[in-house]
Amino acid sequence: MDELKDMITAILHRLEVESAKNEAFRIEMTKFQGEMRSNFKELQSQMDYLAGKLGQHDRDLYILRHNTSSITTEESY
Protein backbone atom coordinates (compact mmCIF):
# COMPACT_ATOMS: atom_id res chain seq x y z
CA MET A 1 0.00 0.00 0.00
CA ASP A 2 2.86 2.40 0.79
CA GLU A 3 4.37 1.67 -2.62
CA LEU A 4 1.12 2.65 -4.35
CA LYS A 5 0.92 5.82 -2.24
CA ASP A 6 4.51 6.71 -3.18
CA MET A 7 3.75 6.15 -6.88
CA ILE A 8 0.66 8.37 -6.73
CA THR A 9 2.65 11.06 -4.89
CA ALA A 10 5.39 10.86 -7.55
CA ILE A 11 2.80 11.11 -10.34
CA LEU A 12 1.14 14.12 -8.70
CA HIS A 13 4.53 15.79 -8.24
CA ARG A 14 5.37 15.15 -11.90
CA LEU A 15 2.03 16.65 -12.95
CA GLU A 16 2.77 19.78 -10.91
CA VAL A 17 6.21 20.07 -12.52
CA GLU A 18 4.75 19.65 -16.01
CA SER A 19 2.01 22.14 -15.23
CA ALA A 20 4.62 24.69 -14.11
CA LYS A 21 6.63 24.08 -17.29
CA ASN A 22 3.51 24.52 -19.43
CA GLU A 23 2.67 27.76 -17.62
CA ALA A 24 6.21 29.06 -18.14
CA PHE A 25 5.99 28.15 -21.82
CA ARG A 26 2.61 29.90 -22.13
CA ILE A 27 4.05 33.04 -20.53
CA GLU A 28 7.06 32.98 -22.90
CA MET A 29 4.75 32.53 -25.91
CA THR A 30 2.58 35.45 -24.79
CA LYS A 31 5.68 37.60 -24.36
CA PHE A 32 6.93 36.54 -27.81
CA GLN A 33 3.56 37.36 -29.38
CA GLY A 34 3.66 40.82 -27.80
CA GLU A 35 7.15 41.42 -29.13
CA MET A 36 6.11 40.25 -32.59
CA ARG A 37 3.10 42.59 -32.58
CA SER A 38 5.34 45.46 -31.51
CA ASN A 39 7.90 44.63 -34.20
CA PHE A 40 5.16 44.35 -36.82
CA LYS A 41 3.74 47.74 -35.86
CA GLU A 42 7.22 49.27 -36.06
CA LEU A 43 7.83 47.64 -39.43
CA GLN A 44 4.44 48.83 -40.68
CA SER A 45 5.29 52.36 -39.57
CA GLN A 46 8.61 52.22 -41.41
CA MET A 47 6.92 50.85 -44.54
CA ASP A 48 4.35 53.67 -44.41
CA TYR A 49 7.18 56.20 -44.13
CA LEU A 50 9.02 54.65 -47.07
CA ALA A 51 5.85 54.57 -49.16
CA GLY A 52 5.35 58.27 -48.45
CA LYS A 53 8.93 59.05 -49.40
CA LEU A 54 8.57 57.03 -52.59
CA GLY A 55 5.46 59.03 -53.46
CA GLN A 56 7.35 62.27 -52.89
CA HIS A 57 10.22 61.08 -55.07
CA ASP A 58 7.82 60.03 -57.83
CA ARG A 59 6.22 63.48 -57.68
CA ASP A 60 9.63 65.19 -57.77
CA LEU A 61 10.71 63.09 -60.76
CA TYR A 62 7.49 63.96 -62.57
CA ILE A 63 8.08 67.65 -61.94
CA LEU A 64 11.72 67.42 -63.06
CA ARG A 65 10.76 65.55 -66.23
CA HIS A 66 7.99 68.04 -66.95
CA ASN A 67 10.33 71.00 -66.40
CA THR A 68 13.07 69.34 -68.47
CA SER A 69 10.72 68.61 -71.36
CA SER A 70 9.44 72.20 -71.36
CA ILE A 71 13.04 73.50 -71.40
CA THR A 72 13.93 71.15 -74.28
CA THR A 73 10.80 72.26 -76.19
CA GLU A 74 11.68 75.95 -75.71
CA GLU A 75 15.24 75.38 -76.94
CA SER A 76 14.03 73.76 -80.15
CA TYR A 77 12.29 76.99 -81.22
Image (tube, rainbow, N blue to C red):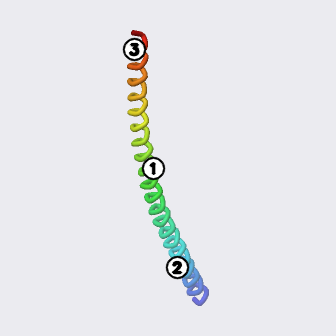
Query: Label 3's element?
Result: helix
Instruction: Estimate how packed mark 1 is, as few (under 14), some (14 to 19) or many (20 or more) residues with alpha carbons within 10 Å.
Output: few
Query: Label 2's element?
Result: helix
Say what amino acid the circle numbered 1 marks. Gln
Foreground: disc 3 or disc 1: 3
Foreground: disc 2 or disc 3: 3
On the image, which quarter does residue 13 sit in?
Answer: bottom right
Residue farthest toward the right in the current orientation of the protein:
3
Foreground: disc 1 or disc 2: 1
Q: Is residue 35 above or below residue 11?
A: above
Instruction: Estimate how packed mark 3 is, as few (under 14), some (14 to 19) or many (20 or more) residues with alpha carbons within 10 Å.
Output: few
On the image, which quarter does residue 9 sit in?
Answer: bottom right
Say what amino acid the circle numbered 2 marks. Glu
| Residue 55 image offset from top left, x and y in percent | 39, 37
Instruction: Residue under label 1, please give it.
Output: 46
Identify the residue at horizontal 45%, vertical 50% (top origin): 46
Residue farthest toward the top in the current orientation of the protein:
77
Instruction: Residue under label 3, please give it.
Output: 73
